[in-house]
Amino acid sequence: MAAAAALAFGLQVWLATSPAWVAGSVLVYLGVAVPVYRFWSAARGGFGWPNRVTLARAVLVAVLAGVLALPEIVQRHGAVLAALAAAALVLDGLDGWIARLLDGATRFGARFDMEVDALLILVLSIAVVLADRAGPWVLAIGGMRYAFVAAGRAWPWLRRELPLSRWRKFVCAAQGFVLAAALLPWLPPLLAQAALALALAALTHSFARDTLWLWRRRVRIS
């Protein structure tokens, strides 16, 4: 929490913005930290360096989310927000690498990483809309994974574990980079919107392919 507050405070002072950024960042971080602590305690394992890196990413995501209540800052400082997002995306590759290097991959760590990824994509989608870089249709990028999870509550066959897929990993990573790039003020809006549309199309294809795979297994089981 202290890290999120310190980073948000530093940015707030540097950019001469509202202190509400700090309060928002702390609230978002607490919203992430409480369930993380709960599920980590249930897992009864050491936290480990990979999860510490993921927690650092959560700090960056919390600071990004904290600014969403201040659209004028999003519109004026898109490059700063894009830099924060880029740092979070780079750390996304680092935590997985450390987990493989130290043979420290865990079920909790994989879920923690996935949830931080999903939250980052959602936050960036909202930021792109608030920055008036694209229309509300961009929210489909950030909301698709949450819609898939919600659908799984109604149809349990959607909760079945999926096989590893390089295409799925690539598409997921691409969403973050495209959304972050769209926040850059010097990127032509038409180019940003075209890239976002391609990213959304790739994401839709990925989810559709996974849903079809799950449906076929569901039919076989029944």
Image (cartoon, helix red, strand yellow):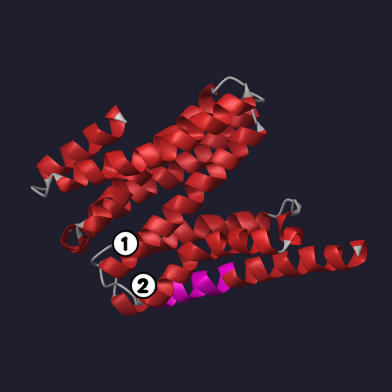
Question: Which picture quadrant has residue 74?
Answer: bottom left
| Mark 2 residue type | Ala
Which residue in the protein does label 2 denote? 192
Note whether residue 203 is visible. yes
Up/down of 7 relative to 178, above or below:
above
Q: Position of residue 17 (x, y in %)?
A: 11, 49
Q: Nearer the viewer, mark 2 or mark 1?
A: 1
Which residue in the protein does label 1 denote? 127
Residue at the (59%, 61%) spot, across then down: 150
User: Judging from the image, what secondary structure is the residue with disc 1 in?
Assistant: helix
How far apart are the two marked residues, 2 and 1, measured between alpha carbons? 14 Å
Question: Is the residue marked by circle 1 packed among few (<14), some (14-19), or many (20+) residues within 10 Å?
Answer: many
From which residue to which does the magenta span run?
Answer: 194-203
Residue at the (87%, 68%) spot, across then down: 219
Residue 51 counted in the magenta span: no
For the N terminus, the image quarter is top left
Q: Position of residue 182 (x, y in %)?
A: 34, 66
Residue at the (34%, 44%) spot, across then down: 28
User: Judging from the image, what secondary structure is the residue with disc 2 in?
Assistant: helix
Q: Position of residue 83 (x, y in %)?
A: 30, 49
Q: Position of residue 34 (x, y in %)?
A: 44, 34
Secondary structure character of the magenta stretch overall: helix
Up/down of 58 relative to 219, above or below:
above
Question: Is the residue marked by circle 2 packed among few (<14), some (14-19), or many (20+) residues within 10 Å?
Answer: many
- Name the N-terminal-most of marks 2 and 1: 1
Residue 202 counted in the magenta span: yes
